[in-house]
Structures are given as C-alpha cells and as structure tokens.
Image (cartoon, rainbow, N blue to C red):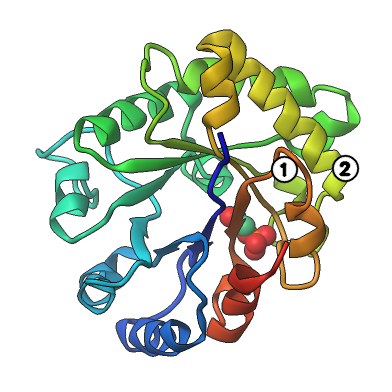
C-alpha cells in the first residue's frame, strides 16, 4: 500500500494572528497539490487560520492538548475545543513538551486516547537525546516510547509517528538520511510486532529535525520516510512551500 507523504509545519510559539494570516495567504499561492499538508499554529491563531483554510486541502493542527474534555485545568485546551475551532490534527509528545513541561509517555498515552475519542488525527513525536544515541540506547528509548505511548490503543489509522532525534531539533544538524531510515525501519518493525504487518506497512512515519529545502529530497528518498515535521523552516511561506513541493 502506497503511503501518502505528509508534511506538517510546527510553528511552536511563533507568529501573531496577523503574521499567521499573512503566511497562509502567501503559502496558498505557492503550494502544489500533491502531499498531505498540515499547518500547526499557536492556539491564538487557530481560529483565523481555520477560517482561511476552510475548503482548502491544507489541514489545520494544534501543537498540544489536555487529555480531559473540560474542567478546572487553568490554561489548558481540550480535544473538543480543538475540533470546535477546526483542527483535524494535533501534535502530541513533542520533545519540547517532554523537556520543558515534563510530559511523560504515560501522559501522552492519555492524550492520544482523548484525541482519538474526539476524532483528531495525531502526530506522535518520539526520539532520543544525543547522550542516549551515543550510549547506543536509541532503539531501547524508541521501543519504550512506542510501547507506552500506544498502550491499549487498538487503531493506528489516525496516528502518524514522527521520529525526531532531539539532537537534530533546531540545531541545523539533521540526521543523515541513512541514520533516519534505520530508526524508521526499526519503528515499522515495532508496529508490526505490536499490531500486525499491515499496520507496520501502512502507518506513516515522518521525520523531524532541521528539515529544510536542501535536505528534504535526500531524506524523502528513503523507503521508510513518509514526510516531515518542520519547525524553523516552516515559518517562512516560501521556504515551507519549497519543502512541500520537493519532487522525489
Ligand atoms: P526544527 O524543528 O525543524 O526547527 O528542527 C522540528 C520540530 O521540532 O518539530
């Protein structure tokens, strides 16, 4: 089964509403329709972005959510609210959430369940630190992240895995296509074991970490890399469009 490429922009804590509108208007003119494209602005820009992306094939995503549907959780946003504002996707388990906000695999597992219940598609981020890689712990870390984040989750249809080696995020130091491919293949094997061969084959596994218009093609030529999660290089409409329009 051919896996359709998915390219997502993670704007992180960047862009005012005005800046988001300007990006989307420019980006729409530059983009060629051939991949699944998702833009994940900050919460404050979601409403306007949703309005602008209505009837467009570019989809909207959020960068995080709480696992409860509502209640006394000051400062949090729920899956119901994300659906309400027009999100189709949500990024969960990003390494910055794990590092700065102490998110654990167990918490991410709860969030995944809540997102699935509310029909959101999930971009689940996993990846190792430099220290873990140097200590040859990459596979163990990845295995533990996959097993715990996906515990008791039966259906992988709406889950995309994003392999993001932490040492490659925002550093300009991307994993080589070969390094990324090795881990993507390993993840596919894990999914085959956890579910079945078909799910192993059909789940999209995208790469993230210093992706740009220059390294995109080489990364995407790898058999098991099905797209990209792009941070820094997604903030400029021209550069993100170039990444999305890369011919493989
Ligand atoms: P980067 O970020 O492209 O700036 O390395 C990727 C990410 O954190 O998703």
Q: Where is residue 165 in the image (x, y as percent from the top left)?
A: 72, 43
Q: How crowded is mark 1: few (under 14 residues within 10 Å), some or many (20 or more)?
A: many
Q: Which residue is drawn at 35% across and 62% down?
A: 59
Query: In the drawing, does residue 206 fall left or right of residue 106?
Result: right
Q: How crowded is mark 2: few (under 14 residues within 10 Å), some or many (20 or more)?
A: few
**Mark nearer the viewer, 1 or 2:** 2
Q: Which residue is drawn at 45% across and 67% down?
A: 13
Total numbered circles: 2
Q: Name the residue under label 2.
A: 178
Q: In which quarter of the image is residue 49?
A: bottom left
- Answer yes or no: disc 1 within 8 Å of ligand 1: no
Q: Where is residue 63 in the image (x, y as percent from the top left)?
A: 40, 54
Q: Residue at x 46, y 73 (%)?
A: 14
Looking at the image, is 134 positioned above or below residue 200?
Answer: below
Q: Where is residue 216 in the image (x, y as percent from the top left)?
A: 74, 63
Identify the image quadrant of the C terminus. Answer: bottom right
In the depicted view, which residue is nearer to us: 171 or 1? 1
Q: Where is residue 225 in the image (x, y as percent from the top left)?
A: 69, 44
Query: In the drawing, does residue 20 fall left or right of residue 192?
Result: left
Identify the image quadrant of the N terminus. Answer: top right
Q: Residue furthest front?
A: 1
Q: Which residue is drawn at 28% across and 32% down?
A: 116
Q: Residue furthest left?
A: 71
């Amino acid at each position: 089964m051919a896996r359709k490429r998915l390219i997502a922009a993670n704007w992180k804590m960047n862009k005012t509403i005005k800046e988001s509108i300007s990006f989307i208007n420019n980006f729409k003119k530059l983009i060629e329709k051939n991949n699944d494209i998702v833009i994940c602005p900050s919460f404050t820009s979601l409403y306007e972005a949703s309005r602008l992306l209505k009837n467009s094939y570019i989809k909207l995503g959020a960068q995080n959510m709480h696992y409860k549907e509502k209640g006394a959780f000051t400062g949090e946003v729920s899956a119901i609210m994300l659906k309400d504002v027009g999100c189709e996707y949500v990024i969960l388990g990003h390494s910055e959430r794990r590092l700065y906000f102490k998110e654990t695999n167990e918490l991410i597992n709860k969030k995944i369940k809540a997102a699935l219940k509310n029909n959101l598609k999930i971009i689940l981020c996993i990846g190792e630190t430099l220290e873990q890689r140097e200590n040859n712990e990459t596979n163990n870390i990845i295995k533990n992240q996959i097993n715990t984040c996906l515990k008791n989750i039966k259906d992988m249809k709406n889950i995309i895995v994003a392999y993001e080696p932490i040492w490659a995020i925002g550093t300009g130091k991307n994993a080589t296509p070969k390094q990324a491919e090795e881990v993507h293949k390993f993840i596919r094997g894990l999914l085959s074991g956890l579910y079945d061969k078909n799910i192993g084959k059909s789940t999209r596994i995208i790469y993230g970490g210093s992706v740009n218009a220059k390294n995109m093609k080489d990364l995407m030529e790898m058999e098991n890399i099905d797209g990209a999660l792009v941070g820094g290089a997604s903030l400029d409409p021209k550069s993100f469009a170039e990444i999305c329009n890369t011919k493989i």
